[in-house]
């Protein structure tokens, strides 16, 4: 999808989605030079954004509290395992496996997120622990084929602290500031 069609779609819908914004950014970053029509389309989009004719949809208007809870459990278990063995585990793989087997707990407000956290601790804690344990077992038992497999983004860092930092930034940007494990 080109810049002109993205701008046309945004004007028609009245919204510029994060995906559309990312695609425009990617095109601008990779193109050696934009055409006059593309510059005009971008100018039209900017004017529409300034007048409110087109509204930019925020990147994340909601969070999945289950991601925070799974990351917390996975981090704890992986740290225990890595301290007592020579194994290096990928927290992202483990979290993704567990998340695919648990219900999402979305919230749009801090109050809603706190409610979901409390509910999950009361009703789902044992299931969360079970799924993380199963994810770790599967990870440790996985075959070693597909060495060309690439992680999403450039997460080629095998350092656990860097992996955790990247995951927290992606999935729970306010995790360290607002989430209390006690």
Image (cartoon, rainbow, N blue to C red):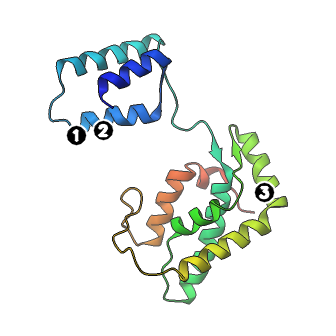
Secondary structure at numbered mark 2: helix
Q: Earlier in the sequence, mark 1 or mark 3?
A: 1
Secondary structure at numbered mark 3: helix
Q: Is residue 166 above or below residue 18?
A: below
Indicate the quadrant containing the N terminus: top left, top right, bottom left or bottom right.
top left
The residue that appears at 75% across and 53% down in the rendered structure is 117
**Nearer-the-camera pick, 58 or 24:** 24
Residue 30, numbered label: 1
Give the Cα distance between marks 2 and 1.
6 Å
Give the Cα distance between marks 3 and 2.
38 Å
Q: Is residue 25 above or below residue 6?
A: below
Q: Is residue 34 above or below residue 50?
A: below
In the orientation shown, which residue stands out farthest toward the left? 32
**Nearer-the-camera pick, 67 or 168:** 67
Q: Which residue in the structure is indicated by mark 2?
A: 26
Residue 120, numbered label: 3
- Disc 2 and disc 1 in contact, CB within 8 angstroms: yes
Quick one: label 3, few (<14), some, or many (20+) residues within 10 Å? Answer: some
Relative to residue 153, is residue 113 drawn left or right?
right
Quick one: label 1, few (<14), some, or many (20+) residues within 10 Å? Answer: few
Where is residue 15 shown, x and y percent of the image? 49, 22
Q: Earlier in the sequence, mark 3 or mark 2?
A: 2
């Amino acid at each position: 999808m080109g810049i002109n069609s993205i701008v046309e779609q945004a004007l028609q819908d009245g919204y510029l989605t994060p995906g559309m914004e990312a695609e425009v950014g990617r095109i601008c970053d990779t193109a050696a030079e934009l055409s006059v029509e593309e510059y005009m389309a971008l100018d039209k989009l900017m004017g529409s954004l300034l007048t409110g004719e087109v509204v930019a949809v925020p990147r994340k208007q909601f969070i999945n509290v289950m991601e925070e809870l799974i990351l917390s459990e996975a981090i704890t278990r992986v740290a225990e395992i890595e301290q007592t063995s020579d194994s290096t585990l990928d927290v992202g793989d483990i979290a993704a496996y567990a998340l695919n087997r648990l219900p999402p707990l979305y919230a749009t407000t801090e109050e809603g997120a706190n409610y979901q956290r409390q509910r999950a601790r009361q009703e789902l804690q044992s299931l969360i622990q079970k799924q993380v344990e199963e994810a770790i077992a599967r990870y440790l038992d996985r075959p070693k084929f597909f060495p060309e497999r690439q992680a999403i983004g450039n997460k080629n860092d095998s350092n656990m602290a860097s992996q955790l930092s990247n995951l927290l930034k992606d999935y729970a940007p306010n995790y360290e500031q607002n989430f209390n494990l006690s």
